Image (cartoon, rainbow, N blue to C red):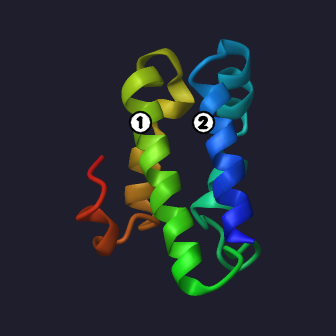
């Protein structure tokens, strides 16, 4: 199931990088996306699949969101706040800091 979310996130990334209208829709509900791919609400919406696949999804998602933030952050206020939101809420744990540094 995590593999499915990775594939869907790849498709979202493709359109996110190419379409302002699509970016606007995704950024409008960025918390919903974060809940599904970064496990920001583990009690109500845990990541599916084996633990190693869930971790792979989370790492991939954070990398993509970091890339979006760097490329499109200045144009989207909600997107600018995502790295701080993830850090403050401890959704990016110390093990991920080595891989991804916002």
Indicate the quadrant containing the N terminus: top left, top right, bottom left or bottom right: bottom right
Report whether 50 appears left or right of 92. right
Foreground residue among 3 and 44: 3
**Mark 1 residue crowding within 10 angstroms, few (<14) / some (14–19) / many (20+):** some
Give the alpha-carbon distance from disc 2 to disc 1, as whole Å: 10 Å
**Spot occupied by residue 52 in the image (x, y as percentages of width and height):** 52, 81
- Which labelled disc corresponds to residue 52? none
Residue drawn at 65 percent across, 76 percent down: 42
- When the figure is inspected, residue 80 is found, relative to residue 4, above or below; the finding is above
Q: Residue furthest left?
A: 98
**Mark 2 residue crowding within 10 angstroms, few (<14) / some (14–19) / many (20+):** some
Residue drawn at 50 percent across, 73 percent down: 55
Q: What residue is pinned by disc 1? A: 67
Residue drawn at 69 percent across, 81 percent down: 49
Report whether 29 appears left or right of 18. right
**Spot occupied by residue 70 in the image (x, y as percentages of width and height):** 36, 29
- When the figure is inspected, residue 13 is found, relative to residue 42, above or below; the finding is above
Report whether 17 appears left or right of 74. right
- When the figure is inspected, residue 32 is found, relative to residue 46, above or below; the finding is above
**Spot occupied by residue 94 in the image (x, y as percentages of width and height):** 29, 72
Report if the CB atoms under discs 2 and 1 are less than 8 Å apart: yes
SS state under label 2:
helix
**Spot occupied by residue 17 in the image (x, y as percentages of width and height):** 56, 24
How many marks the image carries: the answer is 2
Foreground residue among 91 and 54: 54
Q: What residue is pinned by disc 2? A: 13
Residue drawn at 46 percent across, 53 percent down: 62
SS state under label 1:
helix
Is tag 2's residue or tag 1's residue first in the polypeptide sequence? Answer: 2
């Amino acid at each position: 199931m995590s593999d499915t979310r990775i594939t869907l996130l790849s498709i979202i990334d493709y359109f996110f990088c190419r379409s302002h209208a699509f970016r606007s829709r995704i950024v409008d509900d960025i918390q919903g996306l974060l809940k599904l791919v970064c496990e920001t609400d583990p009690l109500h919406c845990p990541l599916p699949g084996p633990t190693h696949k869930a971790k792979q999804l989370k790492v991939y998602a954070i990398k993509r969101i970091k890339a979006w933030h760097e490329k499109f952050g200045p144009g989207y206020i909600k997107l600018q706040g995502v790295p701080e939101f993830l850090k403050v809420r401890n959704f990016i744990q110390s093990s991920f800091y080595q891989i991804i540094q916002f």
